Image (cartoon, helix red, strand yellow):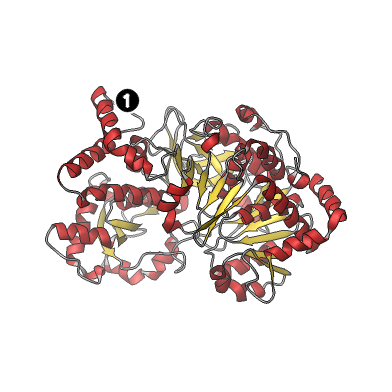
Amino acid sequence: MSATVGTAEPLPLGAAATSARGPYPTLPQLVAAGFPRNTSGVHSATKREGKWIETSVADFTATVRRAALGLAALGVSRGDRVAIHAEPSTEWLALDLAALTLGAVTVPIYPTQPGDQVAFILADSGSTVYVTSAARIWRGVADNVKGVASVRTLVGVRGALDPAMLAWDDLLARGDALGAAGGAALDAAREQVRPDDLATLIYTSGTTGTPKGVMLTHANLTSNVLAVLPGLPWDLEGERPHARVLSYLPLSHVFERMLSYTYQYIGYPIWFIEVVEEIAGDLQTVKPVHFSTVPRVLEKVFAGVHGRAAEMHGLQKRIFTWAVAVADRYKVDAVPSVADRVQRRLADRLVYAKLRERFGGRLKAITSGGAALSAPVMNFFNAIGVFCGQGYGQTETSPVITMYDPKRLRAGSIGLPISNVETRLAPDGELLVRGPNVMRGYYNNPTQTAEVLEPDGWLHTGDIVTRDDDGFLYITDRKKDLFKLSTGKYVAPQPIEMQLVASPLIEQAVVIGNGVQFCSALLVPNETELERRLAEQGQSLDRPVERSEAARAIVQAEIDTVNRGLAKWEQVRAFRLLGQPWTIEDGSLTPTLKIKRRVIDERYRPLIQSMYA
C-alpha cells in the first residue's frame, strides 16, 4: 500500500454495517482501503474536449502524493484551507485527498457560483490556495478572487489561466523538488490526521441569504459512507468486473462527494463526464452500473419517453403506447396481479429492454437526491427494470439521513433512517436527527449554529415530515417555505409544484399565496411540448408565449388536472406564463437548483400582484 494516502486494511464489505457504528477512519484511510478492490485497471476517467483520460490506481496514488508535496511546498500545512473551484475530475479527487493527507481543509465551490459569493467563501474560510480549472469558470470570478487578501496562490488544473496562476504540472513539479526529506515530512503529517479533525468547509447554497460554512470532520463523512453501504441495491462483488459508475453532478455538492468516497472504497472506477447535455452518448460509452442524479433529469426522461409515441405510427405506436401505459400502472409498494406481471414481461421484451439499452445496458440503479422525486417517476423507472429510489439528507449531515430500502420501496417516501442515525419528530412535525454524521457547526457563526444544533447533538433539519406505521418518512415541505393564506389556511407549496412540473408542458413552477386569499403560480412552460400539442390540434404557438391564449388554455387544462387532487384552498386559481427559465446565472436558483423564493417574489412582484387585482 502506498504511503501516499494512509494505511488501512480493507474492511470486508459485509462488515460495513458494524463498522458504521465506529470507530471511524480518516478519509485518506477509507479511500486507501478500497484501492486493492479496484482490479479494473482504472481508478477514474475524465472526459475533456470529447476524449477520455483514464488514470490507473497507481498513477492516481502517485499524483496524490505529488500534489500533497506541491501544496506543502506552497506552505500549506495542518488546518490551512484549500479552495477547489472546478468541475468534477480525477484532479479534483487527487487535490482533495492531497490536502486531507496534509491535515488541511478543503473548501469546495460550485463551478456556477457567482463571483461575489466566491469571494465571500474564500474570505470567510480564510482560504490560502485557490484552484480552478476551465477558463469559463475563471473569467467570471478572476477580479473577485484576486481581491481576497487570504489567497496567496492560484492554481489552474488545465494550465495557467492567468499570469499570476500556477499550472497543475508546475504544482506537481514543486512537490517533486522536495525529494526524500519532503516525503518524510508528508508521511509524518499524514500520521497526525485524526478522524475528528475538520476535513472540509462546505458552504450552503444560500436560498435565503448569505451562505454558511458547514464544518464536517473526517469521521462525519466516513461514518456516512460506511452506513449507506448495506442499502446499496446491487451486488457489490458480483458487479465488480463491469463496475463503472458515472458521475456528472458537482463534487462541490456533498452528496456526490460522499459518493465519490464510497465508489473509491468499494473499488469502482468513476467516469466523470464533461458536458451534461452529452450524457446520453456518455451512458453508451461508460455503461455504468450506477449513477446519481437530481429528480429534474429523471422527470425529463420520463416526459421524453411519454412524448415518443407521438413520433411513431401504426403498430409500433400502439405497442409503445401500450407498454408505457403498463409501466404507468405499476406501483413499487403494491403486489401486482398475475395479469400485470404477464404484461410487464411482454412489455419488457418488446419495449423496456430497448429503453434500458439507452442507459448503456448494465445499469442496476439510479439514486435520486437533492429534491423530492415524484411517485409516478419512481414507479415508472422501476417498472421498466431500472431500480430507482431516493434518499434524503443535508450538507449539515454529511449528507445522508435516510435512504431507500431496496426490498421495500415506498413511492414518495425518503426511506428509513440509516443505521447510525437517530430521528425524532418535533411537535410541529419538523424532523430532528442525531448521529456521527452531524456537523460540528457553522464556521464563524455560533448564533446560527445554536439555532439549529442543540447542545445534546440534535439537529433541526427545517423539514416537515410524516412517518407511516412502518417507519418510512415522507417530506411535507420546508418549514420556512410554508405560507399562510389570508383565510388562515396553511399551504405547503413544494408538493403542488412537484405535481405541476410532472406535466411535460411545465418546466418550472413556483406556487405563491402568502397573505393573500388564494394560491397562484408562475410557470415556465416547455415550449417544444407546447408546440407539439398545439400542432395536434391544428394550432400554432404564438410568440411571446406569455401572451399566447392557446398556450394558456392548454396549460390551464394541466392545472385543472392537478387541482382535482388538491384541497380547495391549495388549488391554483391563477397563473402567469414566463418566457425565460430561471437559472443559476440570473440569481433565481441556487447552485443546487433550488428556487430562491425571495428573489422570485421581488423580481415578479408586479406580475404577481396582477393575479390578485
Residue found 65% across the figure and 41% down from its top: 222
> Within the image, what quadrant is residue 75 found in?
bottom right
Residue at the (29%, 29%) spot, across then down? 345
Residue 572 x, y percent position in the rendering: 27, 55
**Where 389 falls versus 151 (above or below)?**
above
Residue type at tag 1: Val
Most extreme residue toward the left is 538
Quadrant in the rendering for residue 483: bottom left
The image shows a total of numbered marks equal to: 1
Q: Is residue 421 in sight in this rendering?
A: no
Residue at the image point whose x is 65% and y is 58% from the top: 107
**Left or right of 270 in this view: 340:** left
- Relative side of 474 to 46, left or right: left
Query: Around disc 1, counting alpha carbons within 10 Å, would you say few (fewer than 14), some (14 to 19), or many (20 or more)?
Result: few
Quadrant for residue 586, please give it: bottom left
Residue 436 against residue 371 in the figure, above or below:
above
Nearest to the observer: residue 343 or residue 520: 343
Residue 125 x %, y %:
68, 61
Percent across and percent down for residue 248 are 50, 53
Image quadrant holding the C terminus, namely bottom left
Answer left or right for 607 relative to 32.
Answer: left
- Depth check: 355 or 554 in front? 355
Q: Residue at x 23, y 71 (%)?
A: 543
Q: Secondary structure at mark 1?
A: loop
Viewport quadrant of the N terminus: top right
Question: In the rendered image, is residue 458 in sight?
Answer: yes
Pointer 1: what residue? 335
Where is residue 195 shown, x and y percent of the image? 73, 42
